Amino acid sequence: MQNAYPHRQDQAAPGRAIALTHWRLAAADAAPSMALAPLDLPGMVDITAPGDIYLALHAAGRIPHPMDDRAEAQCAWVADQPWWYRADVEMPPLAAGQRLVLDFEGLDTYAAVWLNGEAVGVTDNMFRRWRFDVTARMRPGLNRLALCFTPPDMAITTVDLPTWAMVSSPSAENKRNFMRKAQFGWGWDFAPRLVTAGIWQAATLRVETRAVLRDVNFSTQSLAPDHGAAQVLVEAEAELFACDPARAHLTVTLRAPDGAVVAAAAPALKDGRASLPLTLAQPALWWTPELGAAHLYQLCVTLSVDGVIVDRRDLRVGVRSIALDTSADPDEPGASFFRFILNGVPIFARGVNWVPASSLVAAIEPAHYRHLLHLAAGAHMNMVRVWGGGIYERTAFYQLCDELGLLVWQDFMFACAPYPEHDAAFVDNVRAEVSEQIRRLRHHACLALWCGNNENQAIHGFFNSRSGRDDALQGLLYYDRLIPGLLAQLDPGTPYRASSPLGGPKNDHNNMLEGDIHDWTVWHGLPKMDGDAPLPDYDRSPAGVAYTRYAEDVGRFISEYGIQSSPAMATWRRALPREQRLLGSPGFLHRIKDRPQDKVNAMLVSVTGLPQTLEQYVDYTQLTQAEGLQFGIEHFRRRRPHCSGSLIWQFNDCWPGVSWSIVDYYGFAKAGYHYVRRAYAPVAASFTAGADGVELWLVNDTPETAAGQLRLTLDAFAGGTLWTRTVDYLVAPHASRRLWRGDDGDDGDGAAGRVLSVRCGAGRVPANRHFFAPLKDLVRPAPRPPQVTMNPVDGRTLCVTLVGVDYLYFVHLLGDDASLSFSDNYIDLRAGETRVITVSHPAHAVDAAGLAVRWR
């Protein structure tokens, strides 16, 4: 007997289950005779489930690795070929009242399922779970199970609703919105065209006995203002397929985070459903990290027939309330708030947008989720937005967010396209998908918001404005009626937004006075709209895309903004052969999916100048991204409470390429990650320059008053400290305050040769600094290297001590292992200053010889 969910903690069934992991893969036409063909035909390869066809073919020597060099084109034929998965499965013994069910948690996407040469069913949605009762079809001994996957481009033959030009494959551009399949797989401005197929989530043959639990949910109904009590609700739904309802019984046990039983009951089943309201005294609440601990309770629901347990669910759940405040902002007339209220506390969302962690979605491992999400939590983040062009993530993703206190903004999987409304089968398919995903995810404490789509209303309004038309958006049926209708039934307590961004006049859903916005003036040069007025042209000049334009943003919640940068040199070494690691090489250009491919130059020319080598390109683009993101974050946070969120586009990558990510495909944290980590600190100091001089601000996102002392220093790059001052701070919880204002640092010797720094002796506030001129215009004598010592701390940790001789900028440690963790990196080091960075590895000792120290 095998565990039905070997990779899950949230579900465990006591019945028998056979994990269908080993298959034979063959490329062949869809003729039914293939369902019974021998398993040892020439050309067949082994494949596991879940598993990826490209990787199986690569392992068999049939194609290059799809992430290597320019293999994308060499692998294109895979998406145009029908593929057969086939395996022999032994029928388990059955007793009276038992049935056999084929359970596919995810099939990608158009599949015909065969058993012993007979058709069992078909699938047409990557985002749904497919179950087939095969009790009457299986026979003693071995049974031939076969799945034929039709190429998605062939499955959709008639198209009458063109998409907007957002992806890189013109042929797919006219079809992707007719498929319930991950949209980014057809290519995007950060992603290759790697169209997947196959068994992408767990496949199981289940022996079910008399009854099964179809659904279990836990929700917080209300929370006392003083947090002294909470009303929660446990709901369960059972399918009683071979038993008298009077003989089926539920038991519910709820344990506190410390393991103590706080509730135990046996609610009655009526028409297969049960509901159990509970009152919890002094509940241990679920919080984001800056507010408290992410306490989780353990819920166990068992289903018994005649006293024998036939099914069971175990969920880790959190007690918390979540709301979205969109009330009027009294201090900015005509504007409204857009802020999340967690357990009655308004928060500032410090987060990122998440894209699938690989273009080969079937190959994403739980360990990779853990690595990435621990990086997010380690950067003081409290929210992750699951973007609507990817996938509803695996259960392991949401479990980790529950554990780490990361709120999840969950898009439904619609992105940058109109979607058909008049195809009844398509509408029914979407309805089933949405219902399943709500039921699957609604119990997670991390779930903060459901969002209907990514950018559909905004892009439609943008094109209407440019063309002078007033066409209706195809797809509003889903966002305005179908989805909110299902949420009202299944998850009424979680906030919902029809789109992101959304707010303002009908053709200006990127309005800064209400709702959330996507700020793409920086990087794309997107013009700022003014209601329904004619739209100005793009401005992609250096001044038009400068990151200092974030200072013009007075939005309520910035749910997308970002700057592209290169991955680490270690990633280039993995992705490209040596001869292609050159600026302008075909391999290099292939890794830039945004157009034009030299778009970054408009930003670099004003910040660093243009690079001459790939190594310079890595540093210059990462430096520009890091400085720009820090500038934006600091501006948005200073505007609290009028601005209540910053979600950077994007956190991670789906392949090794140039993108907006701050952590690259292999898990290397870019410079931007470390800048963001410091800028996202719950208590953070920042500088801003204006007509009246330089100001020092402190923002406090914690529930306690922030009090202490900061030290300001004005240094000359040529050497020497010009002055030092101390500044006391006292900042209320959840507030931002200006602490100090001074001049521009120029007393005749030139501000470009000076730097203003802030340090906290107690270490409660990250160090920061202000330059009085653009980076490329700073007057900096060639600095002497820092003094470096490296000493092992224990078997897996190395202590690196850096002592500045001269002022050093962009000081960083480099290693070729993405699993290395740095307590800090990409720092400024003042002359005479000592900084200590710990470097650790989860599995083995850190090799000092494998680390390099660099600066700019």
Image (cartoon, grey):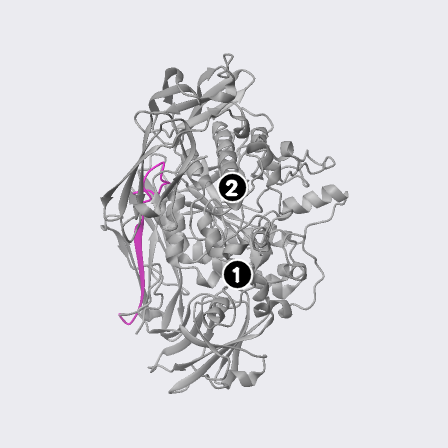
Quadrant of the rendered image containing residue 184? bottom right
Residue 163 spot, x, y in % from top left? 67, 55
Quadrant of the rendered image containing residue 251? bottom left
Q: Tell which of 632 and 192 is nearer to you.
A: 192
Please, what is the dominant secondary structure of the magenta stretch? loop
Residue 478 spot, x, y in % from top left? 60, 54
Q: Tell which of 719 and 759 is nearer to you.
A: 719
Classify residue 252 as left or right of residue 126: left
Determine whether the residue tagged by mark 2 lies in a helix, strand or loop.
helix
Tell me if mark 1 has few (under 14), some (14-19) or many (20+) residues whose alpha carbon lies within 10 angstroms of its own: some
Residue at point 37% right, 52% down?
370
Q: Tell which of 834 and 247 is nearer to you.
A: 834
Magenta span = 284-307
| Distance from the alpha carbon under mark 2 to that under mark 1 | 46 Å
Q: Amino acid at mark 1?
A: Glu
Residue beneath disc 1:
433
Residue beneath disc 2:
616
Determine whether the residue tagged by mark 1 lies in a helix, strand or loop.
helix
Q: Is residue 142 above or below residue 670?
A: below
Q: Amino acid at mark 2?
A: Gln
Q: Residue furthest top?
A: 747
Question: Of callouts 2 and 1, which one flags the residue occurring earlier in the amino acid sequence?
Answer: 1
Residue 406 spot, x, y in % from top left? 40, 45
